[in-house]
Amino acid sequence: MKIALDAMGGDTAPETAIAGAIRAARELPVEVVLVGQQAAIEQHLASYAKRPANLSIVHAAEVIGMDESPVASVRKKRDSSINVGVELLKERKVDAFVSAGNTGAVVSASTLLVGLLPGIERPGIATLLPGVTKDTLLIDVGANIDPKPLHLLQYALMGEAYMRCVLGRVRPTVGLLNVGEEETKGTEFMKETYGLIEASGVNFVGNVEGHDIFTGEFDVIVCDGFAGNVALKTAESLAHAISVLLKRSLAMSPITRLGAWLAHDAFLNLRKEIDYAEHGGAPLLGVDGISIIAHGASGGKAIKNAIRVAYESVRHELNPNMVEAIRLSSQRVPP
């Protein structure tokens, strides 16, 4: 299996991208194809005593910056690491593409160059969030901020297929993020979406609220990209704030510092549970190829785990399973 990695994507690329690629090449049964400026990649690879044999390079002269217009940059910078990596995916020279670069550019390139799966109108970014009892998949977290009810139905079907096929959840539950649990709550858009998902055949549990996201009671929570992105960024900010406030409180006196020392292992376990690096990357569901979006601040561990997410998605034949889920649902829900 070959997985292309955008070596120039991320806040500290190419160092962290290469570090993650090295770890993935050593730990996973894949060939990692580093896509980017070859001279820069070779320079950083030279710092490693031994370069894995299952690591290769494809040159791409240009880089799409984090602050560049996604669609414009994809069209203008044809030789960017994102475009070249997605072209490799389109031509089936690799089985998946991973990038910690400009999210909008990855979404645009994947949609425009690779295209969408049969029956899918808009792709959605899905991310796993830690919960009290188990992880929950939130979709969409930023790909489509002005969706139609049909798009959210498709997110529900794709998210359910991901949790069932890749993570092995038996009959995953699906909830619709809304302002109340009652079926009558929300806008006409939400009510129409509710009806579509209810009739689709998935294990739909109805509306869920913001406080349900981290309980772990639901396998998949569906929302539009605007609400999903706000929820995700709020969660990231809150996790950071809690960490800072907790450290401040624990340093207030000798007794609290002693308590912190005694609870050191517990704090390490908590940090691991909420660390996005453990999940690695967010799959862009709906495109005709496996495309994984990693956090811009990803370190080597997060990049390695993003490649692992790509590997697991290919290995479990995610896309064929999503196509089948869409096909079966179309027989229940009229167009």
Image: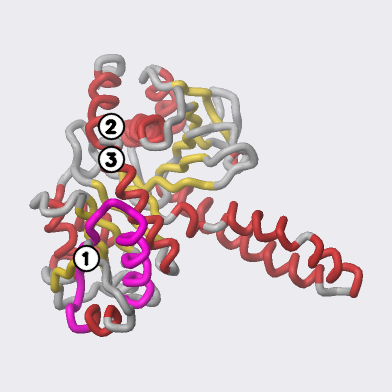
Q: Secondary structure at mark 1?
A: loop
Q: Position of residue 20 (x, y in %)?
A: 37, 66
Any magenta on residue 147?
no
Read off the residue under disc 1: 53
Residue 246 placement, left or right of 33: right
Read off the residue under disc 2: 322
Residue at figure coordinates x 45%, y 40% from the top left: 223
Q: Position of residue 170 (x, y in %)?
A: 45, 24
Residue at figure coordinates x 11%, y 54% from the top left: 93
The crowd level at tag 2 (other Cα within 10 Å; few <14, some 14-19, many 20+) is many
Q: Is residue 177 above or below residue 33?
A: above
* Front one among 46 and 216: 46
| Separation of residues labelled 1 and 3 (CA atoms) | 21 Å
Residue 210: name its quadrant: top right
Judge depth for marks 1 and 2 and give the one in front: 1
- Looking at the rendering, the stretch of residues picked out in magenta corresponds to 14-39
Residue 308 placement, left or right of 191: left
Any magenta on residue 18?
yes
Q: Earlier in the sequence, mark 1 or mark 3?
A: 1
Q: Is residue 182 above or below residue 225?
A: above
| Separation of residues labelled 2 and 3 (CA atoms) | 14 Å
Q: Position of residue 9 (x, y in %)?
A: 31, 70
Residue 271 placement, left or right of 198: right
Residue 50: name its quadrant: bottom left
Q: Amino acid at mark 1?
A: Ala
Q: Amino acid at mark 2?
A: Met
| Separation of residues labelled 1 and 2 (CA atoms) | 34 Å
